[in-house]
Structures are given as structure tokens and as C-alpha cells.
Image (spheres, rainbow, N blue to C red):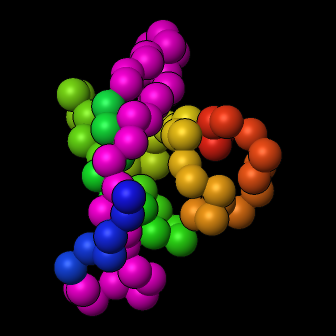
């Protein structure tokens, strides 16, 4: 079940949503790094979640989430939303 997060100065509404999220990236030595965490909130242009280690601004992260169809922009028929 989703609910609208507290209203802030954001341009789009954030929805509080707790879902598992898989995060993949490469460290500075190009070694693959994978982590499973939980989504805290989503909006049309972003997702909020916490990670166990810091990342650099500009570092590419690949996220996979079992997101509800009405919150997606594509892959509406897929189980996981990349």
C-alpha cells in the first residue's frame, strides 16, 4: 500500500513505499559491487534509499525494483523494473 509522503519543496510528490531494491555498481577499481536494500520513497524522477557504503557523486548505479505498474514509465508487463 502506498501513501503520499510529507509535502516539501519538491517539484514532484514523493510516495512512501517500502520495497526491496537491488543496487549494482563498480567500485573505483572496477570490481562489481551488489547490495540489496529497501526503497524508502519514490517520485516521478527519483527514488530514496539507504546504502551500506558511500558512493561518489556521478557514480553510476543500476537499480532493480519490483515497482507497481502505475509508477513505471516503461516495462509495465515485467516483474522487475530496471
Q: Nearer the viewer, residue 11 or 13?
A: 13
Image position of 21 with respect to 74: above or below: above
Residue 60, position as x, y percentages in the image:
52, 39
Q: Which quadrant is home to the N terminus?
A: bottom left
What residue is rendered at 43% in x and 35% in y? 21
Q: Nearer the viewer, residue 39 or 79?
A: 79
What residue is rendered at 52% in x and 68% in y? 45
Residue 4, position as x, y percentages in the image:
32, 75
What residue is rendered at 40% in x and 80% in y? 13
Image position of 63 with respect to 71: above or below: above
Please report the bounds of the magenta region as a residue range.
7-36
Does 34 sit left or right of 72 as displayed?
Answer: left
Q: Which quadrant is home to the C terminus?
A: top right
Residue 33, by quadrant, is: top left
Residue 14, by quadrant, is: bottom left
Q: How many marks?
A: 0
Is 54 a magenta residue? no
Q: Is residue 24 visible?
A: yes
Does 77 sit left or right of 70 as displayed?
Answer: right
Image position of 3 with respect to 34: above or below: below
Most extreme residue toward the front is 1
Residue 40, position as x, y percentages in the image:
29, 52
What residue is rendered at 31% in x and 63% in y? 16
Residue 5, by quadrant, is: bottom left
Q: Is residue 56 visible?
A: no
Q: Nearer the viewer, residue 64 or 33?
A: 64
Amino acid at each position: 500500500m502506498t501513501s503520499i509522503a510529507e509535502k516539501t519543496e519538491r517539484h514532484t510528490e514523493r510516495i512512501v513505499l517500502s520495497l526491496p531494491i537491488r543496487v549494482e555498481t563498480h567500485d573505483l577499481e572496477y570490481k562489481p559491487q551488489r547490495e540489496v536494500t529497501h526503497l524508502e520513497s519514490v517520485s516521478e524522477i527519483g527514488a530514496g534509499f539507504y546504502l551500506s557504503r558511500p558512493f561518489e557523486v556521478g557514480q553510476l548505479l543500476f537499480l532493480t525494483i519490483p515497482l507497481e505498474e502505475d509508477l513505471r514509465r516503461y516495462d509495465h508487463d515485467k516483474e522487475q523494473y530496471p
